[in-house]
Amino acid sequence: EEGPAGDDDLEIAWEVLDIARCLAERAPEDAPSKLFLADVLLRLGDASLESEKPQEALEEYERALALRAHWRPNGWRDLAEIHTKDSFALTVMEPPDLKGAVEHYQAAIDLLSRRQAFLLQVMPTLPPASALAAHAPAPPSAAAESTPSSAAPATATAAAAAAAAGAASISAASSKSDPCPPPSCPANREKAEREVADLREIIAELRTKVEDQLEALNEEEAARKALRELVAETRRRDLFSPPRLGADPRNVVNLGSAQTPASPPQGQGAPAAPVLQVRKKARVVEVHQTHSFLNNNKKTTQIKQQ
């Protein structure tokens, strides 16, 4: 919600989340506490991004990413979510970091691809939903209630107890050998198929975003290259172009660390080389004309004397 009321709500939410962060940071060093802290940091990052503070949001996202990567490395979808948030924060910064955004998008694609590969691997071993529905325990009937000592309930109870004991032993063995919990697995084959289809769409959308960011990055690099070429051409033109008559001697041409003064105007200091050549030619022509005039006068005088 925009306006003063929306700003007040956002500030209250940020204060509550900040208190939650302080409490979570004092919690014991265990997975539930640290994962809760990561969730709080994510919400703080969202609040900072909503307040147009992408740099602060990026810092919160990075802390949440480090916590989740340490305490739940197999939570591929959760890690991919943080990478996409990082990418968005980098694109709205001033100036935007498009290269960093592409790297985070690519990391999210890799994580989701790992989740997709895991589901495809375990999908054949999952039971179909129809089989689970068929083996679901039926509600107790009046006849069953009247005969509690029947063999079927006893058999089902024994099977359930054996399954629980086996699951407990597997969980204990996995916790001793690997402190990280195994990846979450869908309950049946249909749920796995739906998640695979969902992941396929998300990956395709992220690849489209990567292509858009790469295109924008290439356009930005082309613009910078054109600007550098224009500056170099301007400096080259100033270096090799002939000096202009009447130029201000205070103007200089910057060439890296050296500074070459421009030609001074006429009447101030030494004239330019083309001006000297013109004046020299004019003087030679004037001398020749004077000699020709004197020779003609001399011949005319000699003729008159004869």
Image: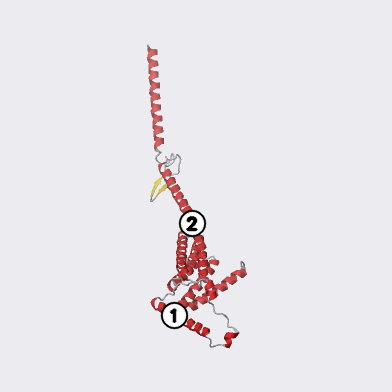
Coordinates of residue 29 in the picture (x, y in percent): 43, 78
Q: Where is residue 219 in the image (x, y as percent from the top left)?
A: 48, 52
Residue 55's disc is none
**Is residue 162 depicted above or below 265 in this figure?**
below
Q: Pointer 2 and pointer 1: residues touching (CB < 8 Å)? A: no
Badge 1 amino acid:
Gly
Q: In percent of the image, x 52 and y 74: which residue is there?
A: 132
Q: Mark 1 points at which residue?
A: 166
Q: In this view, does 43 lie above or below 267?
A: below
Disc 1 crowd rating (10 Å Cα; few below 14, some 14-19, many 20+) is: few
Compare residues 299 and 203 and report the one nearer the observer. 203
Q: Which amino acid does label 2 sit on?
A: Glu
In the rendered image, residue 303, in percent from the top left (x then y), is placed at: 38, 13
- Circle 1 sits in a helix, a strand or a loop, which is it? helix
| Image color mode | secondary structure
Mark nearer the viewer, 2 or 1:
1
**Front residue of 85 and 254:** 85
> Does residue 61 appear in the picture of this structure?
no
In the rendered image, residue 214, in percent from the top left (x then y), is placed at: 47, 56
What crowding class fits label 2: few (fewer than 14 Cα within 10 Å), some (14-19), or many (20 or more)?
few
Q: Nearer the viewer, residue 238 or 298?
A: 238
Q: Which residue position holds label 2?
A: 211
Q: Say which residue appears at 52% left-offset and 73% top-offset.
A: 131
Q: In the figure, is residue 20 to the left or right of 298?
A: right
Please, which residue is most extreme toward the top here? 306
| Left or right of 180, for residue 147 | right
Quadrant of the frame with the N terminus = bottom right
Marks 2/1: CA–CA distance = 48 Å
Is residue 102 in view?
yes
Residue 285: quadrant of the picture: top left
